[in-house]
């Protein structure tokens, strides 16, 4: 059996979890959300179910990225936002 690929290095912060919960509450598809954050759908399910970052509330709808499918990643979307 071959070796595993190296980890992507993409982790989810509590801020990411809040955005994910908002996107899911809006009705975004798991695979679109996963693509936006550069993680697999399992990480999105863990946030949704509370296994990752439990107790983090979703962000307001006005603070969400536009609906997917996403042609840009989270980092590209953040560059265009006024912070």
Image (cartoon, rainbow, N blue to C red):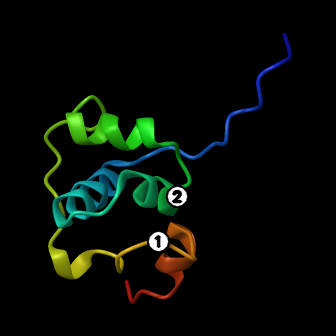
Q: Position of residue 38 (x, y in %)?
A: 56, 54
- Horizontal side, residue 6 vs residue 23: left or right: right
- Horizontal side, residue 63 vs residue 41: left or right: left
Q: Which residue is mark 2?
A: 35
Q: Position of residue 7 (x, y in %)?
A: 68, 34
Whole-number angstrom distance, CA of label 1 to CA of label 2: 8 Å
SS state under label 2: helix
Q: Nearer the viewer, mark 1 or mark 2?
A: 1
Residue 50, compared with residue 82, is above or below; it is above
Q: Nearer the viewer, residue 36 or 54?
A: 36
Instruction: Give the class, few, some or many, for how many residues have Cα within 10 Å of label 1's Cα (few <14, many ≥20).
Output: few
Q: Which residue is mark 1?
A: 69
Residue at image coords 30%, 56%: 20
N-terminal of the pair, mark 1 or mark 2, is 2
Residue at image coords 22%, 63%: 27
Q: Residue furthest top?
A: 1
Residue at image coords 50%, 68%: 74
> Residue 77, labelled with which disc?
none
Q: For the C terminus, give its image quadrant.
A: bottom left
Residue 29, compared with residue 74, is above or below; it is above
Residue 48, compared with residue 51, is above or below; it is below
- Horizontal side, residue 45 vs residue 6: left or right: left
Q: Nearer the viewer, residue 35 or 16?
A: 35
Residue at image coords 37%, 44%: 44
Contact flag, marks 1 and 2 (Cβ < 8 Å): yes
Q: Position of residue 15 (x, y in %)?
A: 31, 57
Residue 48, compared with residue 69, is above or below; it is above
SS state under label 1: loop
Q: Position of residue 67 (x, y in %)?
A: 35, 76
Q: Quadrant of residue 45?
A: top left
């Amino acid at each position: 059996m071959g070796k595993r690929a190296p980890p992507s290095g993409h982790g989810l912060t509590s801020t990411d979890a809040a955005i994910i919960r908002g996107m899911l509450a809006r009705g975004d598809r798991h695979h679109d959300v996963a693509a936006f954050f550069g993680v697999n759908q399992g990480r999105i399910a863990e946030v949704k179910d509370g296994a990752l970052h439990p107790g983090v509330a979703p962000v307001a709808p006005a603070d969400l990225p536009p609906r997917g499918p996403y042609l840009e990643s989270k980092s590209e979307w953040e560059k265009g936002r006024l912070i």
